[in-house]
Image (spheres, rainbow, N blue to C red):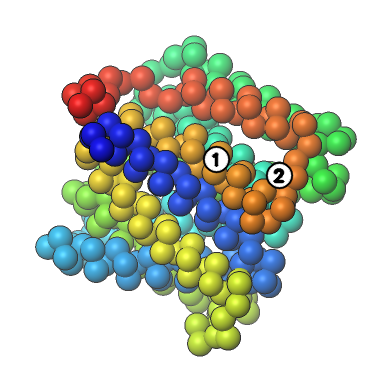
Amino acid sequence: MNSRTGLFGALIIMGAGWGLTQPLGKLAVDGGYRQFGLVFWQVTISGVILGIICLLRGKPLPLRAPQFLACLVIALIGTVLPGAASYSALVYLPSGLVSILLSLVPMLAFPVAVLLGNETFVWSRLAGLALGLCGVLLIVLPEASLPDRSMVIYIPLALIAPLFYAMEGNYVARWGTAGLDPLQLLFGASVIAAMISGPIAVWRGQFINPLGPYGVAEWAVVLSAFIHAGVYSAYVWLVGRAGPVFAVQVSYLVTAFGVVWAIWLLGERYSLWVWAAFAILLVGLALVQPRQPAKAELLES
């Protein structure tokens, strides 16, 4: 297997893994679990795995104020708040629809990047943002777009996560990571996110007993956490191997696999309006992707 085939294979596996986390989240909330209990165990399991990886790499987490601040911000806008919003949305909306709306991250990131001075204005990327808005409107406006019309009021809830993820990427681009590499940053953010979400879960009666018994919902929580840690580690590797422009193409696969997994595992079905929105959002996603040249030697080898 040549290098190019291996890189594309890694991209597909990552997309399939990340796409699976949304249906797993749906199984967990259908089992009666709620947002802060789910966030706590996701970040706790992920944090343990990432901590072990950091130690094996000989790169433990520095405990100084700048690093703590970076981890705190990522914990809030990259984990606790969007995670809680996504799990809350999954209580009321189909998993595949939540996956489709997550494709708005790059589109929402563009205006934030322009406002912060991270990027210059580009008309083609504005067109991608407009297509993203059209895709959302195709889901919200037609009477026959959703299985139950009452679901419309929860669409804004599902849009909170992509907005926070868009803010997260721009925060890192604008203010950096205080010298932490991505795995160190995510490990520190996971620890802080656990310290935030754990007490909230106990206070709101959402804490999940790790002693079992274990059924579909419980294993969905565990599997989702392992996938999150494993795929994120693979993403960091892929960025270093093929560059960020190549790695970011996983966005298409995450959305597509999220829909496919939801159809296969959960038996979800969508109206023609939702499929049309899906197609429009993928076109919009293509328009807002960064245009920097990739490492040609990696893709041609």
Q: Position of residue 99 (x, y in %)?
A: 59, 44
Kindly identify which residue carries mark 2.
155
Q: Nearer the viewer, residue 36 or 241?
A: 241
Q: Residue furthest left?
A: 58
Residue 72 appears in the rendering: no
Question: Which residue appears at 32% of the width and 71% of the height?
Answer: 48
**Callout 1: 10 Å neighbours few (<14), some, many (20+)?**
many
**Above or below for 210 versus 40:** below
Is residue 147 rendered to the left or right of residue 194? right
- Where, by quadrant of the figure, is residue 206 drawn? bottom right
Residue at 31% x, 67% y: name it: 49
Q: Earlier in the sequence, mark 2 or mark 1?
A: 2
Give above or below for 166 relative to 57.
above
The image shows residue 33, relative to residue 50, as above or below, that is below
- Identify the residue position indicated by label 1 in the image: 255
Identify the secondary structure beneath mark 2.
helix
Q: What amino acid type is highlighted by mark number 2? A: Ile
| Residue depicted at 75% across the width and 41% down the height | 270
**In the rendered picture of this protein, how many numbered marks are placed on residues?**
2
Numbered tag placed on residue 278 in the rendering:
none
Q: Nearer the viewer, mark 2 or mark 1?
A: 1
